[in-house]
Image (cartoon, helix red, strand yellow):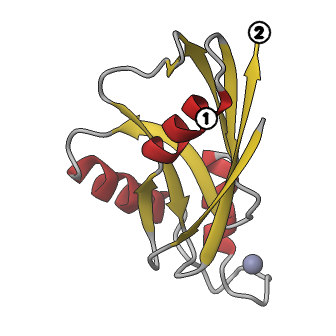
């Protein structure tokens, strides 16, 4: 089953979408299988990271800015090449095991929609498969 979600993002940020993914798993009725969380955008990304200390998300974004600084040398006229680099670096999707009708996440893991060039209206998909 395919589920789609919409969200409004900040200029830059990591939005915890774990509750939406859990909702999709529950609604699918799949007890054993997999899910793919996918974002169809070129300046955003999906990742799994710590959900306990919010400073991790602050540091993640700071680290990405340091790793991929904006530059006058970029050719892309839209002026957001740093966000495109961050998007491909983090990746457009995550693949997660479903068991016992639950996401198989570690205690400290959450699923995040990463915005690198907001604010925008964004969407993401959750595909749940039994197997
Ligand atoms: Zn662009």
Q: Please name which of the two marks, 1 or 2, marks the residue nearer to the observer.
A: 1
Residue 84 horizontal side relative to residue 117, left or right: right
Up the image or down, 76 lies above or below 65; here it is below
- Counting every numbered tag in the picture gives 2
Q: Residue 131 — which label?
A: 2
Which residue is at 30% across, 28% downward? 108
Tell me the SS state at disc 2.
loop
Ligand 1 is found in which quarter of the picture?
Answer: bottom right
Which residue is at 40% across, 60% downward? 61
Q: Residue 81 — which label?
A: none
Question: Within 10 angstroms of label 1, few (less than 14), some, or many (20 or more) residues?
Answer: few
Q: Residue 27 — which label?
A: 1
Residue 85 point in image, percent of width and height: 67, 61
Q: Nearer the viewer, residue 121 or 61?
A: 121
Q: Point out the image quarter for the N terminus.
A: top right
Up the image or down, 4 lies above or below 29; here it is below
Up the image or down, 109 lies above or below 114; here it is above
Q: Point out the image quarter for the C terminus.
A: top right
Q: Nearer the viewer, residue 73 or 19?
A: 19
Residue 46 point in image, percent of width and height: 59, 48
Tell me the SS state at disc 1.
helix
């Amino acid at each position: 089953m395919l589920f789609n979600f919409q969200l409004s993002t900040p200029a830059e940020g990591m939005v915890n979408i774990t509750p939406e993914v859990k909702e999709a798993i529950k609604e699918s009725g799949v007890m054993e299988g997999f899910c793919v969380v996918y974002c169809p955008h070129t300046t955003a990304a999906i990742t799994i990271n710590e959900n306990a200390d919010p400073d991790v998300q602050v540091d993640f974004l700071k680290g990405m800015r340091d790793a991929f600084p904006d530059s006058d040398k970029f050719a892309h006229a839209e002026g957001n090449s740093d966000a495109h680099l961050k998007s491909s670096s983090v990746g457009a999707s995550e693949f997660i095991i479903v068991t016992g009708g639950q996401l198989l996440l570690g205690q400290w893991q959450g699923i995040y929609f990463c915005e690198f060039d907001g604010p925008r209206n964004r969407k993401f998909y959750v595909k749940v498969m039994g197997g």
